[in-house]
Image (cartoon, rainbow, N blue to C red):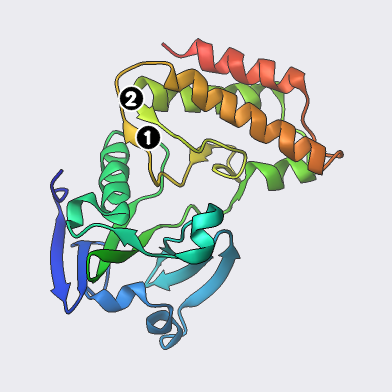
Amino acid sequence: MSRPAGFVEIRQGAHICWLREDSLSTLSSEVFEPEFWRARNAVIGTAMGRGTAWFVRDGERQLVLRHYRRGGLFGRLVKDLYTGITPAYSRAMRELSLLDSMFRAGLPVPEPIAARMSRRGAMYRADLLIGRITNASDLLAVLQRQPLTVHQWQQIGAMIRRFHLNGIDHTDLNIHNILLDDDGASWLIDFDKCSARPPGNWQQDNLARLLRSLHKEKRLHPALHWSEHNWSALLDGYHSQS
């Protein structure tokens, strides 16, 4: 795996960064620090997940800054350290490279902007900077507000199929990683630990994971505007793509 075309590599101390040349006003490791954006009064919001995601503004462009954090029991002991010393195989650089290939293919994903690994002996920490999909909410938030039409469910299914036809295995396909914008377009986000693969059982595994996610959120939020009929519409859209 090599650095994508159009990205430069900058090394500053323990930090190794890949940055898209034409997408940032400052090509420095500092852009991965929330304090850098705070000092410029450029933090425009945050979102909580496994960690905090920072929404920042660089000129007219809105970006999302994310620090990689571990989940599960192991994550309680080692919150954000990963094993490895090769930049191209770090979590951030791999996700950036995959995003770049999908973005160039015209798939509905955030624009890849920059990635950083920060070495600490034989381990590292990682950060990612991507374009923000503006005026968009995740599928959970949308379904808590209102139902979707049959056509909208079909569009979501067709969107997922586009990724599968391009060999993209989204190993964490769930209700939180699908966004809908104000124009009705659907997007897919969060490609950590995802990859490009030949066709296989993983495609049905992706769909099964999404269905489990919908069932889980329906149990947690009984008023959620979702039913099995909606799933059938999603599958109709999925199978309409060839």
Q: Quadrant of the C terminus?
A: top left
x, y percent for residue 2: 13, 47
How far apart marks 2 and 1 lie (CA) works out to 9 Å
- Residue contact at pointers 2 and 1, CB within 8 angstroms: yes
Camera-nearest residue between 143 and 2:
2
Residue 65 seen from this side: no
Mark 1, residue position: 107
157 left or right of 198?
Answer: right
Ranked by sequence position, the earlier of labels 2 and 1 is 1
Q: Quadrant of residue 193?
A: top left
Q: Quadrant of residue 64?
A: bottom left
Q: Secondary structure at mark 2?
A: loop
Q: Quadrant of the N terminus?
A: top left
Q: Residues within 10 Å of mark 2 (few under 14, many from 20)?
A: some
Camera-nearest residue between 174 and 162:
174
Residue 136 seen from this side: yes
Q: Secondary structure at mark 1?
A: loop
Q: Residue at coordinates 50% horizontally, 38% vertically from top-left?
A: 172
Q: Residue at coordinates 54% horizontally, 43% vertically from top-left?
A: 177
Above or below: residue 6 compared with residue 76: above
x, y percent for residue 240: 51, 11
Q: Which mark is residue 166?
A: 2
188 left or right of 168?
Answer: right
Above or below: residue 64 compared with residue 203: below
Q: Residues within 10 Å of mark 1 (few under 14, many from 20)?
A: some
Q: Residue at coordinates 14% horizontally, 69% vertically from top-left?
A: 10
Above or below: residue 204 compared with residue 86: above
Q: Quadrant of residue 23?
A: bottom left
30 left or right of 220?
Answer: left
Identify the amino acid type marked 1: Leu
